[in-house]
Image (cartoon, helix red, strand yellow):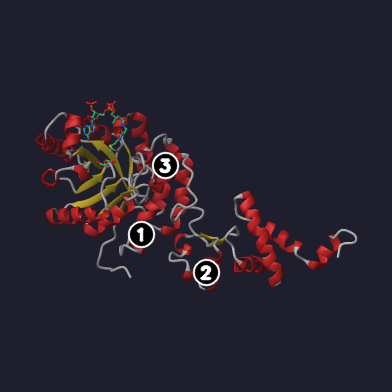
């Protein structure tokens, strides 16, 4: 049971910004709008739609996203510069994320400046955007490699300048969940700002880190459909919202039954096919082949199914292959209206296994029927060569 006292975690989807930064991925305006509409239909709370500083075409696309969605808040991503704020203003949106590096390494490499300069930029640019009537979240790029005391100062400066949120970015995916939890516990004690976690998946820990950040006090989670994004990508929307509600003890507003359609749309438009085993949305995520599993499942689905496919608008599939057992064969035949003879089913199983191994794929129902028919003693007698017993 999820405690009613805890507020839902707000989901900020950045498929259209960080997701599109994935190498080789580029969405047209129409594609951005189509993805945004599906995110909105899935009740995702916030959509980070793009980077206005990229120029007029991107500004037009962000504005089109803003006009296309009904419920979600649409946000433009900016660097911490007045010029980027001016570009964002042209989108007509009312909300922006102003990003600034906060690790010493990035501050020096990108700006050749000091920490004081970053604080001054935050004061100046956040103040400028607020004066233009924009709601501002401040993104701390490379927060996970920043000096913690400086991070606190940057957050305090953001709050003082009128920001409503600080986004902690694990830009290079170097955190692990225990450290993430500790960091967010400490930050939560420091500030009353909304706290968002943006995690990259370089070590495959982005979803785990997002759950840990929420446990530590993050109010917002930044995610991308299918974990699309720079390099190894970001925390995946479908994983984060499913894990929060199923094992993280927290609600989100996202409708889980929309996740698979959403993933299929983004996969198509990003030209990034969904791996079969991708959690929640992959074609194999609710498919079972092994005989021991299928035999248990057929007695009680809970035996081998902790997540009901129905939660996600999906259906369980039982697949016939090299690891099938008799129960799976009998079940498939029975479902096709065949009165199953046990000895014939056993012979059929041998053929199913051979076919799966030979062709390295699942065996179709039509093939199963053929194999079973071939074990019919009457048919065998008819087809036996003359003189055979
Ligand atoms: C970790 C992240 O995901 S950050 C977001 C990354 N997203 C993108 O880069 C979006 C796509 N980017 C672009 O289209 C281009 O890089 C633009 C339009 C933003 C800028 O293009 P250009 O003017 O040609 O600059 P270029 O890309 O070569 O370099 C980036 C500039 O931004 C500066 N910069 C980088 N981060 C920030 C920041 N947070 N705040 C202010 N300035 C920044 C760099 O120092 C560099 O400035 P310089 O040209 O004065 O040295
Ligand atoms: O500062 C931000 O808004 C986050 C930028 C980003 O995508 C990252 O740091 O990985």
State left or right for residue 37 relative to residue 345.
Answer: left
State left or right for residue 84 relative to residue 189.
Answer: right
Q: Is mark 2 on a helix, strand or loop?
A: helix
The single residue placed furthest to the bottom in the displayed view is 299
Query: What is the number of the mark on residue 33?
Result: 3
Q: Between residue 10 and residue 95, name the one nearer to us.
A: 10
Q: Nearer the viewer, mark 2 or mark 3?
A: 2
State left or right for residue 175 relative to residue 334.
Answer: left
Query: What is the number of the mark on residue 217?
Result: none
- Tell me whether the residue at label 3 lies in contact with that at label 1, contact meaning CB atoms closer than 8 angstroms: no
Is residue 138 shown to the viewer in this render?
Answer: no
Q: Disc 3, ligand 1: is the CB inside 8 Å?
A: no
Q: Disc 2, ligand 2: is the CB inside 8 Å?
A: no
Which of marks 2 and 1 precedes in the sequence? 1
- Ligand 2 shows up in the quarter that is top left
Q: How far apart are the alpha carbons under marks 3 and 1?
A: 27 Å
Q: Mark 1 = which residue?
A: 243
- For label 1, the crowd category at 10 Å Cα-Cα, with few meaning under 14, some 14 to 19 and many 20 or more, is some
Q: Mark 2 = which residue?
A: 297
Q: How far apart are the alpha carbons under marks 1 and 2?
A: 22 Å
- For label 3, the crowd category at 10 Å Cα-Cα, with few meaning under 14, some 14 to 19 and many 20 or more, is many
Is residue 30 shown to the viewer in this render?
Answer: yes
Q: Between residue 64 and residue 239, name the one nearer to us.
A: 239
Q: Which of marks 3 and 1 is in front?
A: 1
Question: Measured from the top left, where is residue 178 in percent x and y?
Answer: 24, 56
Where 364 falls versus 29 (above or below)?
below
- Tell me whether the residue at label 2 lies in contact with that at label 3, contact meaning CB atoms closer than 8 angstroms: no
């Amino acid at each position: 049971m999820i405690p009613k006292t805890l507020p839902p975690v707000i989901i900020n989807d950045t498929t259209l910004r960080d997701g599109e930064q994935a190498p080789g991925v580029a969405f047209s305006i129409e594609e951005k709008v189509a993805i945004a509409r599906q995110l909105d239909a899935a009740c995702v709370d916030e959509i980070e739609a793009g980077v206005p500083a990229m120029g007029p075409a991107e500004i037009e696309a962000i504005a089109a996203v803003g006009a296309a969605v009904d419920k979600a808040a649409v946000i433009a991503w900016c660097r911490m510069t007045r010029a980027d704020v001016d570009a964002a203003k042209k989108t007509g949106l009312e909300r922006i994320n102003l990003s600034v590096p906060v690790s010493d390494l990035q501050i020096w490499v990108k700006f050749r400046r000091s920490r004081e300069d970053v604080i001054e930029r935050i004061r100046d640019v956040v103040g400028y955007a607020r004066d233009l009537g924009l709601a501002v979240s401040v993104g701390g790029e490379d927060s996970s490699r920043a000096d913690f005391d400086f991070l606190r100062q940057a957050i305090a400066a953001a709050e003082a300048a009128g920001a409503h949120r600080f986004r902690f970015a694990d830009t290079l995916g170097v955190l692990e969940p225990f450290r993430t939890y500790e960091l967010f516990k400490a930050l939560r004690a420091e500030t009353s700002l909304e706290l968002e976690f943006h995690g990259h998946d370089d070590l495959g820990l982005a979803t785990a880190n997002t759950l840990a950040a929420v446990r530590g006090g993050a109010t917002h989670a930044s995610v991308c459909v299918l974990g699309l994004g720079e390099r190894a990508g970001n925390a995946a929307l479908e994983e984060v919202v499913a894990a929060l509600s199923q094992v993280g003890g927290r609600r989100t507003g996202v409708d889980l039954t929309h996740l698979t359609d959403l993933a299929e749309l983004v996969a198509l438009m990003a030209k990034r096919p969904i791996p079969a085993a991708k959690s929640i949305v992959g074609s194999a995520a609710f498919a079972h082949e092994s005989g021991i599993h299928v035999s248990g499942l057929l007695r009680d689905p809970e035996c081998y199914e902790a997540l009901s496919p129905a939660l996600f608008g999906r259906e369980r599939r039982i697949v016939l292959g090299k690891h099938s057992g008799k129960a799976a064969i009998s079940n498939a035949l029975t479902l096709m209206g065949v009165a199953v003879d046990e000895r014939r089913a056993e012979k059929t199983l041998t053929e199913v296994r051979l076919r799966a191994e030979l062709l390295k794929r699942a065996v179709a129902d039509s093939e199963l029927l053929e194999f079973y028919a071939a074990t019919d003693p009457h048919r065998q007698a008819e087809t036996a060569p003359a003189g055979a017993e």
